Amino acid sequence: MIRNINRKSNENGATLIELLAIIVILGIIASIAVLVIGDVIQKARKQAFVSNAYIMRNASTVYYKNKEFNKEPLVNPVTYNELVTSGFLDVIIDPDTGDKWGLDHTDSYVLFKDGKAVSICLIGMKRKLCGEKQGEDYLPLPLDQIREENVEDRES
């Protein structure tokens, strides 16, 4: 009979130590998940920035060909501001801040050579996709190098 009483008292639930162990394990899993999710978010923002570069390249190509077709003076480089004001590109929403780039956002451009887009410099609020810095400006990045690994943090 005493054995039955002892057995029943042990079956009532988990001990305090077991509960603490479970809480610690869940805390470790949660902290790992937060780190992984943070990396995924940063990667997605870089990919969105690269997508903006491709969108700007495509819009500038259509803009340039439209100017050629209409025998209007060609603009080189084609700036972000020119694309937005002429209606070939919607205002870009920065993937890092969620803010819209205004028309004063004049640092981004696509460079043409022999009627073809050859390079780009896209400068966001926190990131950039350009070549090396030369003086106060950045050199454009060749179009075949538009990749996530070439997106860099913008210097303050």
Image (cartoon, helix red, strand yellow):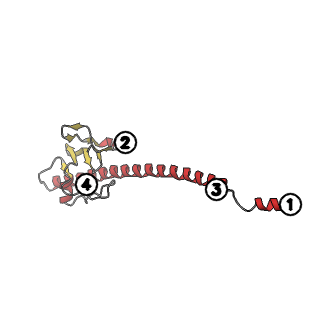
In the image, what residue type sits under mark 2? Answer: Glu
Q: For this rendering, which residue is in front, 83 or 2?
A: 2
Point out which mark residue 71 bears.
none
Give residue 154's position: percent from left, percent from top: 28, 45
Q: Earlier in the sequence, mark 3 or mark 4?
A: 3
Q: Alpha-carbon distance for marks 2 and 1? A: 70 Å
Q: Earlier in the sequence, mark 4 or mark 1?
A: 1
Q: Which residue is mark 2?
A: 149
Q: Earlier in the sequence, mark 2 or mark 1?
A: 1
CA neighbours of label 3 inside 10 A, class few (<14), some (14 to 19), many (20+): few
Q: Which image quadrant is residue 5 in?
A: bottom right
Give the secondary structure at mark 1: helix
Q: Alpha-carbon distance for marks 1 and 3? A: 27 Å
Determine whether label 3 and label 4 are within 8 Å by CB.
no
In the image, what residue type sits under mark 4? Answer: Ala
Determine whether label 2 and label 1 are within 8 Å by CB.
no
Q: Which residue is mark 3?
A: 19
Q: Which residue is mark 4?
A: 59
Q: Which residue is mark 1?
A: 2
- Closer to the observer: label 2 or label 3? 3
Q: Quadrant of the N terminus?
A: bottom right
Q: Residue at 47% across / 49% down in the picture? A: 35
In the image, what residue type sits under mark 1? Answer: Ile
Q: Give the number of marks.
A: 4
Give the secondary structure at mark 4: helix
